[in-house]
Image (cartoon, helix red, strand yellow):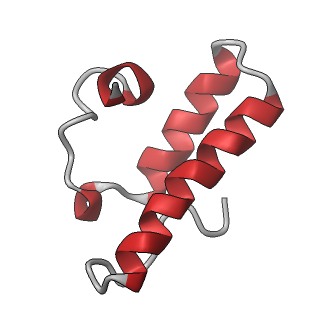
Amino acid sequence: MWTGFWGAGQADKRLDEITRGTIRDLLTSQISEGYSRATVTLNKDVIGGVFNHAIDEEILASNPCRGI
């Protein structure tokens, strides 16, 4: 599932390896592939939710989706 969403080489990254640049590149690529802005925003919100949960569980200290 994640391979199709993230693209080749990105799906096996650990959460702590995903940067703001990774998220920005993903969303920019989705826009250029013709995804609607609403879909891209929804995807960002879903990914951000995963990071927020990791923060709540004290797995990560910050959310790379914040501020994008």
Q: Is residue 53 above or below residue 44?
A: below
Q: Is residue 9 left or right of residue 65?
A: left
Q: Is residue 68 left or right of residue 49?
A: right
Quadrant of the image containing the C terminus: bottom right
Q: Quadrant of residue 58?
A: bottom left
Picture residue at 49% right of the left edge, 47% below the top: 23
Q: Nearer the viewer, residue 62 or 1?
A: 1
Q: Quadrant of residue 65?
A: bottom right
Q: Is residue 55 above or below residue 23?
A: below
Residue most toward the top?
A: 33
Percent position of residue 62, x then y:
43, 79
Q: Is residue 18 left or right of residue 53?
A: left
Picture residue at 22% right of the left edge, 28% below the top: 9
Percent position of residue 52, x then y:
49, 72
Q: Quadrant of residue 30?
A: top right
Percent position of residue 5, x then y:
43, 26
Q: Is residue 60 above or below residue 41?
A: below
Q: Nearer the viewer, residue 25 or 61?
A: 61
Count numbered badges in the picture. Answer: 0
Quadrant of the image containing the N terminus: top left
Picture residue at 67% right of the left edge, 18% below the top: 32
